[in-house]
Image: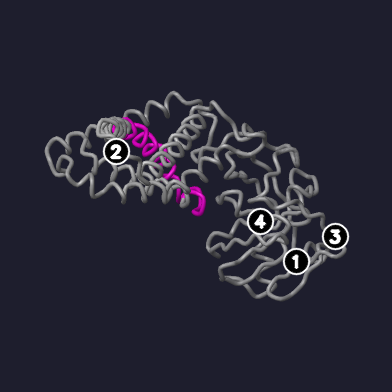
Amino acid sequence: MPRRLTNDLLLGLILLQVLGGVLGWALPVETARPLYDVHRALGVAVILLLAWKQAIALASLRRRLARKQGWDRSIFWGSAAAIALIGTVALGLAWTTNLISFDWLWGYSPLNVHVIIGVALVPFVAWHMLLRRRQNAVSAPIRSRRAFLRVAGLSAATVVGWQAIEHLAPHVRLPTGSKPVGSFNANAFPAEIWLFDSVPLLSPTSWRLNVGGRGFTLSELTALHPPAQVQAVLDCTSGWWSEQVWTGVRLADVLRTAGLESTNVAAVSVTGHRIVLPSADLGEAILATHVGGEGLSPGHGYPLRLIVPGYRGYHWVKWLASLEAA
């Protein structure tokens, strides 16, 4: 395959993977469901394309050694990108085939490392390919019958490889890739924290929930509205899921009391974590005080946690401090 076409395809695949991964986090699970399959399929395409890229890179290095040419910046950027790309692809493949789990890296999820490396790859790969683009302009023409057949072959092999992995991989994960850690066990499931927030120890006497400028104590909040319960899956972006029964008050009731119904809502934690959610997706949302019949533990968001069925776990804001019109 022509060098320029190989580089352009590789850069395009990486950009699509990053975009699909970010949208897979941000969108409701049902909306993003096709993106998860596309993400895994394009991962296979990256693996296959790396074989072509490896042949091109080795041939280039041999020519440089034969001509006694020095190293330039593109080799540094290319080497860094290659190491990162191999690392993130290996983590993704090992995750899909269930060789590693969410607590494999000393308690930090390898799935998050996969995402971080993938995002960081973009400037490395883009810069390397920009530096190489003029040199690669003299390679075989992109618009040729041979190039078309090779791209078609790559596409067919991608579909076959993706389906093979899907059938061979253990079927213990959700479409998002998350794996089960136990359900209906109250506070016993993992207590992951978004980014690197520490668990705040909040006093029930001093804590208040600010809703549209009005402060509520926990007892005032629960006394104003009838209790609500929802059974929902917490699908954490660290790569695990747990189904629990959550009890509290309906978010819609609280917003109606404060005159914030029919508006997009910004939920803010005492740690500063802030999530904006569209009003149309909040019909089943509750402000939870209990899980599985137990009061929320500090790690799970005591005294109040937002539960939004259908969204990924980082939208379920812990240690809720305020609800604002957004």
Q: How far apart, in angstroms, are the residues tagged by discs 3 and 1? A: 11 Å
Q: Which residue is mark 3?
A: 204
Q: Residues within 10 Å of mark 1 (few under 14, many from 20)?
A: many
**Image side of residue 153 versus residue 162, left or right:** left
Q: How far apart, in angstroms, are the residues tagged by discs 1 and 2? A: 66 Å
- Magenta part of the chain: 24-53
- The residue drawn where x is 27% and y is 40% is 6
- The residue drawn where x is 51% and y is 40% is 114
Q: Which residue extends farthest right?
A: 205
In the structure shown, which secondary structural element does the residue marked by tag 3 occupy? Answer: loop
| Callout 3–callout 1 Cβ contact below 8 Å | no
Q: Which residue is mark 4?
A: 317
In the displayed structure, would residue 29 be above or below residue 275? above
In the structure shown, which secondary structural element does the residue marked by tag 2 occupy? Answer: loop
* Residue kind at label 1, given as amino acid type: Leu
**Image side of residue 36 versus residue 143, left or right:** right
**Image side of residue 163 versus residue 8, left or right:** right
Disc on the earlier residue, 2 or 4? 2
Q: Which residue is mark 2?
A: 69
In the structure shown, which secondary structural element does the residue marked by tag 4 occupy? Answer: loop
* Residue kind at label 2, given as amino acid type: Gln
Disc on the earlier residue, 1 or 4? 1
